[in-house]
Amino acid sequence: MASLPIGRALSLACLLTPLLGACVAHGESSTGRASALATTVSRAITCKAGSPQRTTLDRFLAAEKARGADDQQIAAARAAYVGVSEAEMVNQGVRPQACTAEERAELRARMGRIRAGDFDRL
């Protein structure tokens, strides 16, 4: 009887393994980088540390395409950017977070890189 719960746990672990791998590699994917970009842009706007250009998302997606992302990955990255941006806006409205001078300075530097088209260090 003890083997039955162990067998179920093992089956569950096998089913979740691909999902766990996706969580670990989150920052290495187009979707992960899009999420980081959206968080940075949203926080920079909130902290008055810079704003994106109108073409920021399109330039980011073009950079991802150049990195080798396929159409499905590009679509997922676009959806992640939009979803995270909307969530950040709602969260800031519900529970505003103050910005420190150090955070503002870091965000200004990041936004400078983003505005220059450097999406490698999000």
Image: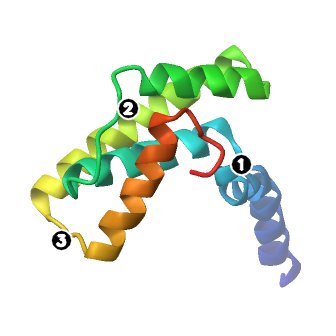
x, y (%) of residue 85?
33, 40
Dots 2 and 1: beta carbons under 8 Å?
no
x, y (%) of residue 63?
65, 26
Residue 28 disc label: 1
Q: Amino acid at mark 3?
A: Ala
Q: What's the residue at 25%, 75% (across, down)?
A: 100
Asked if residue 116 can be seen in this view, the reply is yes
Residue linked to disc 2: 82
Foreground: 85 or 98?
98
Location of residue 105 with respect to 50 vertically, above or below: below
Q: Is residue 3 left or right of residue 34?
A: right
Dot 2: within a 10 Å radius of its alpha carbon, few (fewer than 14), some, or many (20 or more) residues? some
Q: Is residue 24 left or right of residue 6?
A: left
Foreground: 38 or 18?
38
Q: Quadrant of the N terminus?
A: bottom right
Location of residue 82 with respect to 96 vertically, above or below: above
Q: Quadrant of residue 61?
A: top right
Here the colouring is rainbow
Q: What's the residue at 84%, 84% (across, down)?
A: 2
Mark sitting earlier along the chain (3/2): 2
Q: Look at the numbered disc 3 and give the secondary structure of its residue.
A: loop
Q: In the image, which is nearer the foreground, mark 1 or mark 3? A: 3
Location of residue 116 with respect to 33 vertically, above or below: above
Dots 1 and 3: beta carbons under 8 Å?
no
Mark sitting earlier along the chain (1/3): 1
Q: Amino acid at mark 1?
A: Glu
Residue 111 disc label: none
x, y (%) of residue 93?
11, 54
Q: Look at the numbered disc 2 and give the secondary structure of its residue.
A: helix
Dot 3: within a 10 Å radius of its alpha carbon, few (fewer than 14), some, or many (20 or more) residues? few
Residue linked to disc 3: 98
CA separation in Å, label 1 and label 3: 29 Å
